Amino acid sequence: MKGFIHICIFLAMMVVTPSFAGNLHKDDERNKPGDDKKSKAKRDDTTHHALNTQIAEVEEDEQDTSSILFPSNDLYATWDTTTIHPYNFGDCFRADSVTICLTDLGEGRFAMPFKGMITSEFGWRRYRPHYGTDIDLEIGDTVVSAFDGMVRIARSKISGYGNVVIIRHANGLETVYAHLSKILVEAGQPIKAGEILGLGGNTGRSYGAHLHFEMRYLGQALDTEDFIDYAKGDLKTYEFTLRKSDVENKYDLRAMHNRHRHDVGAVKYTTKNGVKYGIYRVRPGDNLGVIAKRCHTTVSAICKKNGIKPTKILQIGQKLKV
C-alpha cells in the first residue's frame, strides 16, 4: 500500500499544468544569454548612431577654407591676415620673367589712391630703403583702392606703417596704404577700384601727413612710378613684364646697397701732394663706364685723373685713380 502511494505522488509531481509549463518556458527565455534587460537596452539604444550622424552633419557643414579662392590663390601659399609681408620673392619667384596685366584695357579699373604731389620717391634713403611713393595729403582726406581686389591686412599701430591697409589683387600684385588716420575696411572684404579704404593721416614713422603707397609682387616692392603717371593720374601701361634681372638691378634696394658698399670697399684711398685719390683695381668685365658708375664719378673725370682717353682698353689688375 505504501509503495502504491509513493508511486502516485511521484506521478503527480511529474504532471505539469499548462500555466506552470508556460512560466517555466518564460523563465528559460529570460535566462537566455544576451537577453537580459541591460542587453535589451543596449540593443534598443540609438544614441551612438545619432551622435555619429550629428558629427557627420557638422563635418559636412564646416567651411573648408582651403577651397576658398582668394585673389591670386595659385601664386601665394597662404592668406595671412596678421603678418604684413610674409612672402619672400626669392623663394616664390621661380621663372626668369612674368607678364603682369595691371587692368583690362578701357574698363577703368584703376583709380589714384589720392591725387596729390609726390614728396618722396622709391629708393634708398640715407639710413634705410624707402619701398614706396609718398603722396602729400591732409589728415582726413579719403584714400581709395587703386585696383579691384580683397583686403588682406587692415591693422593699426604697425611699426613704421602706422595704420595700414594691404589689398591683394587678382594679378598677383599687392598694394599698401600706410600712415592712415582711420581704417574703413576689414580683412577679407572685397573692394573695387576707387572705393574708400581709409582716411589719410600721420601715423607710424611719419613726419607730416602723407600717404605711403607701395606696389609689391610676391613680397618684392616695385617702383610705382614705373607704372603710374602721377601727373596725369593714370596708368602708363596696362601690362608690363617683370624680369628677375629688374629686381636684382633696380628693385631689391638692400641687395643693391650691399653691392654698392662692396664696390666702394674695393677702392683704396691714398693722398698725394695733399690731394686724396681713390685707387681702383680693374676687374673682369670692367670698362670706364662701369667703373665711373660704381665709384660715383664720370668717365671724363677718370680719364683726366689718369691721363687716358675714353677709348683706352683696360687691363685686369690695372690701377686707376678715381
Image (tube, helix red, strand yellow):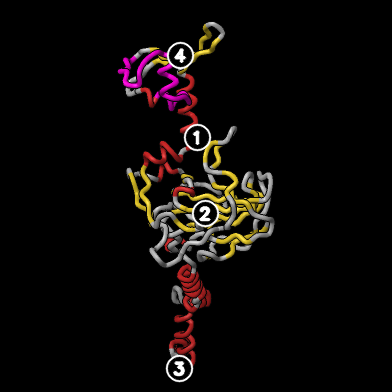
User: Element under label 2?
Assistant: loop
Tell me, yes or no, whether the highlighted magenta stretch contains residue 301.
Answer: yes
Q: Is residue 48 visible?
A: no
* Residue 122 pos. (x, y %): 52, 43
* Residue 212 pos. (x, y %): 59, 49
Which residue carries the number 1 mark?
254
Q: Earlier in the sequence, mark 2 or mark 3?
A: 3
Q: Quadrant of residue 67?
A: bottom left
Q: Disc 3 marks which amino acid?
A: Pro
Above or below for 151 versus 243? below
Judge by depth and name the residue closer to the eye, 305 or 37: 305
The span from disc 1 to disc 3 (Cα, nearest Å) is 104 Å
Magenta residues span 291-316
Query: Disc count in the image?
Result: 4
Judge by depth and name the residue closer to the eye, 225 or 22: 225
Mark 4 crowdedness (10 Å alpha carbons): few <14, some 14-19, many ≥20 = some
User: Element under label 1?
Assistant: helix
**Which residue ends up furthest to the bottom in the rendered image?**
18
Which residue carries the number 4 mark?
279
Above or below for 274 versus 44? above
- Labels 2 & 1 near each other (Cβ < 8 A): no
User: Element under label 3?
Assistant: helix
The span from disc 2 to disc 1 (Cα, nearest Å) is 29 Å
Which residue carries the number 2 mark?
231
Q: Closer to the camera: disc 4 or disc 2?
A: 2
Judge by depth and name the residue closer to the eye, 47 or 192: 192
